[in-house]
Image: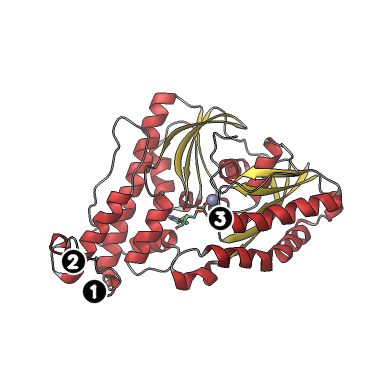
Amino acid sequence: MLILGIETSCDETSAAVVRDGRQVLANVVWSQTAAHEPYGGVVPEIASRQHTLAITRVARQALAESGMAAGNLDAIAATHGPGLAGALLVGLTFGRSFAWGLGIPFIPVNHLEGHIHSVWLSDQSQSEPPPLPALVLIVSGGHTELVLMRDHGMYQEIGRTRDDAAGEAFDKVGRLLGLPYPGGPSIQDASTRATDPTPFPRAWMAGTHDFSFSGLKTAVLHATYETGSGKSAHSVQGTPFPRAEIASLLSPEQVANFAAGFQDSVVDVLVTKTLEAAAALVPRSIAVVGGVAANGALRERMGECVSVPLFISQPKYSTDNAAMIAAAAYYVPQSDNEIDVAPALSLEAL
Ligand code: KG4
Ligand code: ZN
């Protein structure tokens, strides 16, 4: 079964052709990062308009690279949520119209279910997929969740972030340290130059499988301010915190040490809490998916600490892409030609 997947939930316009939910024939990702970089984050209206500009070209390129004609497709799938409403509408409407024109089913896909299925993707279809039930850590710019996957389409949320997602914390701390957007890859890169990583606290959220990263973000803000200005962060409490210039007061070595200490703290919490949940739930495998799964330190620590079969999405399938959407559509093929976008869609709503 050949599915064209389409992903436009945030700032990547992507189209992919995937055979039988696993074998990626083409996966084209057009990143809008350059359009959003001047603003230090994703601007929703710019995202929608960039998708409109790129979607036809990206879909055409995916078909050409796959060596397939539109007439070979069995179905078309697109993300319908969660994500930015205007951005989702571009992919959903394009995909559904294309499917209608070809007379084939249209399959709406939950973006989080797409991330989960990124570990089913393979460039060589012979590798084994994760045995179920699997404990899945979803770590992206918008989500940090632990999910027990009993089967395709059957998910139980075990824990979630109470405030920022891990990727969001990477992006905000990256901005605070004056590093290029998005913060995740920049912090990973700066960390390699650390001489003495700054220790930061960990929020363990004891007795739960939940996460919290906003306190860590504030700890980095205070530490960078105190190092850069030589003043105690408490001395400016109650007044608007002077943030913009903090990075310019830090040496590259200090930036690297803050970046590495922050990354250590996030990775430690993600790995430790995943292991705790695994001890309680005894899954047959552990999967790590979402943009932050591309992080080298997280991949390494997970690899060292996890004793059940571990599946971490390949970096190219960790960040937003359409191949994972086509994979999820193959395993959960519920077609629907009237569905609306669902910006706040959760996994258990499936
Ligand atoms: O899954 P994704 O592409 O989009 C969402 O669904 O949110 O995740 C994007 C997030 C961003 O916050 C980005 O900073 C983070 O993934 N990210 C990383 C790395 N690469 C991307 N975080 C840490 N280390 C990385 N290497
Ligand atoms: Zn995502």
Type of amino acid under label 1: Leu
* Mark 2: secondary structure: helix
Residue topped by disc 3: 84
Question: In the displayed structure, would residue 253 be above or below residue 75?
Answer: below
Q: Which residue is mark 2?
A: 227
Q: Where does residue 4 sit, x and y in percent of width and height?
A: 74, 50
Mark 3 and 2 residues: CB-CB less than 8 Å, in contact?
A: no
Question: Which of the two labelled residues, at mark 2 and mark 1, occupies the earlier sequence position?
Answer: 2
The residue lying toward the viewer, choosing from 197 and 243, is: 243
Do residues under tags 2 and 1 come within 8 Å of each other at their CB atoms? yes
Residue 15 position in % (x across, y down)? 69, 56
Rendered location of residue 7, percent (x, y): 64, 54
Q: On residue 249, which mark appears?
A: 1
**Position of 283 compared to 264: left or right?**
right
Question: The disc labelled 2 sits on which kind of residue?
Answer: Thr
Residue in the picture at 38% in, 44% down: 301
